Image (cartoon, rainbow, N blue to C red):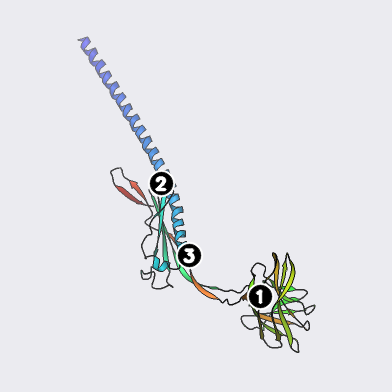
Amino acid sequence: MMRRMSWTVRSRRRGSAYLLVLAVTVLVTATGIGTLLVQRIRTRTAVWSADGQRASAMAASAVEMAAYQLANRASWRTGFTSGSWTTAVSIGEGSLSFKLVDEVDGTLSDDSTEPVRVYGRAQVGSAVRVFSVVARPRAVTSDPNLLLNSGFEDKVNGWEAYGKATLELDASKVAGASSLRAKSRESATTGPSQDVTASVSKGTMTTSVWCYSDRSSAETLQVLLELETTGGTSTITLATGTVNRSWRQVSGTASVTWSGRLNRAVLRMRTVSDKADFLIDEVRFQPFGSSASTTTVMTFDPSTWRREADSAELIDDGKGAIVVVPR
């Protein structure tokens, strides 16, 4: 009888020990699996984060790609269809594309004055990013005049005295708000000037200036181009004309050329007879035959930049399905 009871106690002890070992094993296994899941989540999150950052950068580049087309392809309004994505371009581990959307009437080609919304899309791994911004048309006038502040709307900036003289704005003018007065001149050779070294080139040039003289009798105004080169110095007469106490335009055409390397070029004005004050306005110095032209360019409105709702992560749910998770 005692033997039977002893065996029963030992069997129960063995069963309890087995259950304890089993429970510990399950706990260890669960902990291990949990740790692996956490690590997997952390790894996946890190990958999504890195892919998302790269996708964001590439989506912004896709917008820049569209901007290049708007700036350099004159026929872009007929070459693209509103709302249609361009063929994706693969770059590294990702791909990008863009589309143009006319939000006014859905047609790009019917009106060049309508704005467009530019979308840039990129995908890197499972990350998709889409950004957009509105591009608005703006008229830009190209003026062939090589002189800065030629109408003296920006004070006397760009101009300086040649020799001893004082330059100041004057209320008398041909156009705009003011003209430029040359006063306290040391001699007839002194007057206003502007450095045109960076803009002048060889060729036939047209020059014109409106002038008013304080001299009681007629005076002769000269517009000269002083050149300093490795071959020496020279002076070219660009225009000459008679002026008096009323606004008159002096104009001329001359061939501009030099030998050697150009070191400095200065356009200046002087009188012939004496050092009386004179005024100038609306000065032009440009290639012969050239004229102002107006073109339309598309400029981005930064206040309209936004990240689109279809930016997302494409996640495999492990069951053969792709889950789109907005980001």
Q: Is residue 314 left or right of residue 217?
A: left
Residue receiving disc 3: 72
What is the x, y in percent for residue 112?
43, 72
Q: Amino acid at mark 3?
A: Asn
Q: Amino acid at mark 2?
A: Trp
Q: Amino acid at mark 1?
A: Ser
Q: Quadrant of the N terminus?
A: top left
Q: Is residue 81 left or right of residue 237?
A: left
Residue positioned 67% across, 86% down in the render: 248
Residue positioned 36% across, 35% down in the render: 34
Q: Quadrant of residue 276?
A: bottom right
Rate crowding at label 2 as few (under 14), some (14 to 19) or many (20 or more) other CA atoms within 10 Å. some
In this rendering, the label closer to the viewer, 3 or 2: 3
Question: Is residue 284 in view?
Answer: no
Residue 48: give its label: 2
Q: Residue furthest front?
A: 259
Rate crowding at label 3 as few (under 14), some (14 to 19) or many (20 or more) other CA atoms within 10 Å. few
Question: Is residue 97 in view?
Answer: yes
What is the secondary structure assignment of the residue under circle 3? helix
Looking at marks 2 and 1 on the same chain, the residue that comes earlier in the sequence is marked by: 2
Whether 291 is drawn above or below 301: the answer is below
What is the x, y in percent for residue 17?
30, 21
Looking at marks 3 and 2 on the same chain, the residue that comes earlier in the sequence is marked by: 2
What is the secondary structure assignment of the residue under circle 2? helix
Q: Is residue 110 left or right of residue 201?
A: left
Rate crowding at label 1 as few (under 14), some (14 to 19) or many (20 or more) other CA atoms within 10 Å. some
Looking at marks 1 and 3 on the same chain, the residue that comes earlier in the sequence is marked by: 3
What is the secondary structure assignment of the residue under circle 1? strand
Q: Nearer the viewer, residue 174 or 306?
A: 174
Q: Quadrant of residue 206?
A: bottom right
